[in-house]
Image: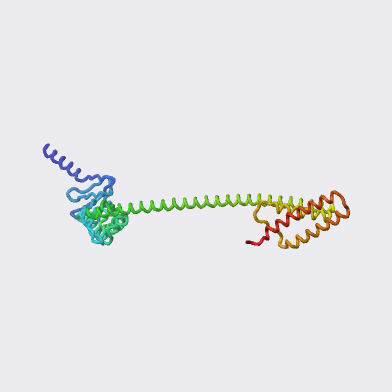
Amino acid sequence: MLILTIIVIIIIVVLAFKAVKILRPYEKGVVERFGKYRRTVESGLTFIIPFIEIIRKVDLREQVVDVPPQEVITKDNTVVVVDCVIFYEVTDPFNAVYNVVNFYQAITKLAQTNLRNIIGDLELDQTLTSREMINTQLREVLDEATDKWGTRVVRVEIQRIEPPKDIVDAMSKQMKAERMKRAAILEAEGYKQSEIKRAEGDKQAAILEAEGQAEAIKKVADAQKYEEVAIAEGQAEATIDVYDAIHAGNPTNDLIAIKYLEALEKIADGNSTKIFLPTEVSGILGSIGGIAELFTDEDLNKKEKPTKVKSSKIQKIMEKVKETSDEVYKPKE
C-alpha cells in the first residue's frame, strides 16, 4: 500500500512538472494539441495538458545572423569577397514556427543571393563607396522576403568588401598618384598666389613711389613757380621804379646817348671771340656820328670844361666801336 502511494505521488509530481510551464518576458509559446496548433501563450506561468499538449517557445529578442563570406562579381568583372551581418527579430511566433524550417539557413542563403544581385549591378568603385546604399537595399529585400516568416529585418551591415590583391595594389598606386597630383596642384596654387601677392605688392609700391615722385615734382614745380613769380614781380617792380625814376628825372638826349655808348663799350670790351652787333650797324654808326657832332657843336658853343671832357669820352667810345665793327666785318683772306 505504501509503495502504491509513493508511485501515485511520483506520478502527480511528474504530471505537475509537465503541466506547468514558465515563459520568460522575452518569450512566447505556441501550444499544440495532438500535433495541431491550439493557441499562442504569453510570457509568465502557463498550464498545459501533459502528454496531450506541447509548447514551442519562441525568442522575441533581436538576433544576429553572420552571413559567411562569398565571392561576388561586380559590373566591371572584378571579383570581390563580401560578407555581412543581419539583425532580425520575431514578430509573429506562429509564422516563425510553421512557415520556415530553418530560419538561420534560409536567411543566410537569401542574403547571399541578394548580395550577388545588388553588387552585380555596381562597378568596383561604387561598391567600395556605397556601403550604406547596399545595406539599405539588402535590408529592404530581406525584410520583404521574411515577412511571411513572422520576422522583421532590423538592419543589415556589410562587414567587409575585399578586392583581389592586385586590384588593391593598383588602387594604392592610384591613390598615391592622386595624392601626389593634389600636392603638386596645391604647391603650384600656393606659388601662384605668392607670385600674385608679390606682384600686387610691387604694383602698390610702384604706385606709391610714383605718387610720391609726382607729389615731389609738383612741390618743386610750385616752388619754382613761386620763385619765378617772385622774381618776375621783383623785376616788374624794379622796372616800374626805374621807369618812374627816369620819367621823374626827365633825362636829356645827351644822357641817353652816353648810356647807349657805354653799353656799346661794354660789348666791345668783352672777352668773347665773337661779338654780335645790331643788324643795322651802319645806321647805328651814323646815328652815333650825328650824336657826336651834336655834342661837338654844343661844346664849341658853350666852351665849358665839363662838356669837353664828355666830348673826348664820346670820341674814345666811337673809336672803340669802330675798331670792333672793323674786326667783325673784316673780309676773310
Q: Nearer the viewer, residue 104 or 266?
A: 266
Percent of width and height locating residue 94? 25, 55
Q: Which of the 4 image quarters holds residue 118? A: bottom left
Percent of width and height locating residue 59? 25, 49
Tell whether 195 sits left or right of 303: left
Query: Which quadrant holds the N terminus?
Result: top left
Percent of width and height locating residue 315? 78, 54
Q: Nearer the viewer, residue 89 or 93?
A: 89
Q: Residue furthest top?
A: 2
Is residue 292 something one can see in this rendering? yes
Percent of width and height locating residue 174? 29, 54
| Residue depicted at 67% across the width and 56% down the height | 275
Q: Residue furthest right?
A: 302
| Residue depicted at 21% across the width and 56% down the height | 71
| Residue depicted at 23% across the width and 47% down the height | 47
Tell whether 219 sits left or right of 70: right
| Residue depicted at 83% across the width and 58% down the height | 294
Q: Nearer the viewer, residue 65 or 280?
A: 280
Is residue 39 something one can see in this rendering? no
Q: Nearer the viewer, residue 172 or 275?
A: 275
